[in-house]
Amino acid sequence: MTTNESMNIRGIRKRRVGVVVSDKMDKTVVIQIERLVPHPVYKKYVKRRNNVKAHDENNEYQVGDRVEIVETRPVSKDKRWRVNKLIDRPVVR
């Protein structure tokens, strides 16, 4: 089975980019997803933020990392996402 065939069977999964805001749990990180939404009356763009818990198997992501997360089957009561890859790590001075 090729990757395209398995993609069709499992469907298209949502992907989001966010920042790790907490890594205190074992195998779990809290990701803050920020998006811009137009205000219904004034049409000015407003920032909306959501926190989601994502599965981090090897505890490799730290606070401040920009990561891509992928929707997955429920891993626990609150976890519905899995960390896919590291996009950017802040420079420590």
Image (cartoon, rainbow, N blue to C red):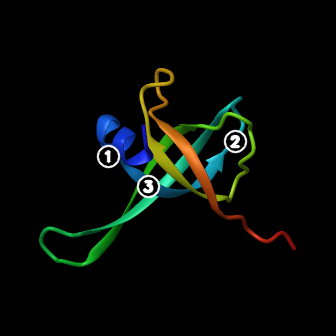
Q: Is residue 39 left or right of residue 66?
A: left
User: Does dot 3 land on a helix, a strand or a loop?
Assistant: strand
Q: Are marks 2 and 3 in contact (CB under 8 Å)?
A: no
Q: Position of residue 89 (x, y in %)?
A: 72, 64
For label 2, count other residues whose C-alpha is less than 10 Å away and answer few (under 14), some (14-19) or many (20+): some
For label 1, count other residues whose C-alpha is less than 10 Å away and answer few (under 14), some (14-19) or many (20+): few
Q: Which numbered disc covers residue 49?
A: none
Label 1 amino acid? Answer: Ile
* Labels 2 and 3: the sequence-earlier one: 3
Tag in front: 1 or 3: 1
Disc 1 to disc 2, how far (Cα)? Answer: 28 Å
Q: Tell me the residue at 61%/53% (across/down).
A: 85
Q: Tell me the residue at 30%/42% (across/down).
A: 8
Vertical comparison of 51 with 44: above or below? above
Residue annotated with mark 1: 12
User: Does dot 2 land on a helix, a strand or a loop?
Assistant: loop
Q: What is the quadrant of residue 5 in the picture?
A: top left
Q: Tell me the residue at 52%/57% (across/down).
A: 18
Q: The C terminus appears in which quarter of the rendering?
A: bottom right
Vertical comparison of 9 with 32: above or below? above
Vertical comparison of 17 with 25: above or below? below
Q: Tell me the residue at 74%/36% (across/down).
A: 58
Q: How many marks?
A: 3
Residue annotated with mark 2: 23
In the depicted view, which residue is nearer to us: 38 or 78?
Answer: 78
Residue annotated with mark 3: 16
Label 3 amino acid? Answer: Arg
* Labels 1 and 2: the sequence-earlier one: 1
Q: The N terminus appears in which quarter of the rendering?
A: top left
Disc 2 to disc 3, how far (Cα)? Answer: 18 Å
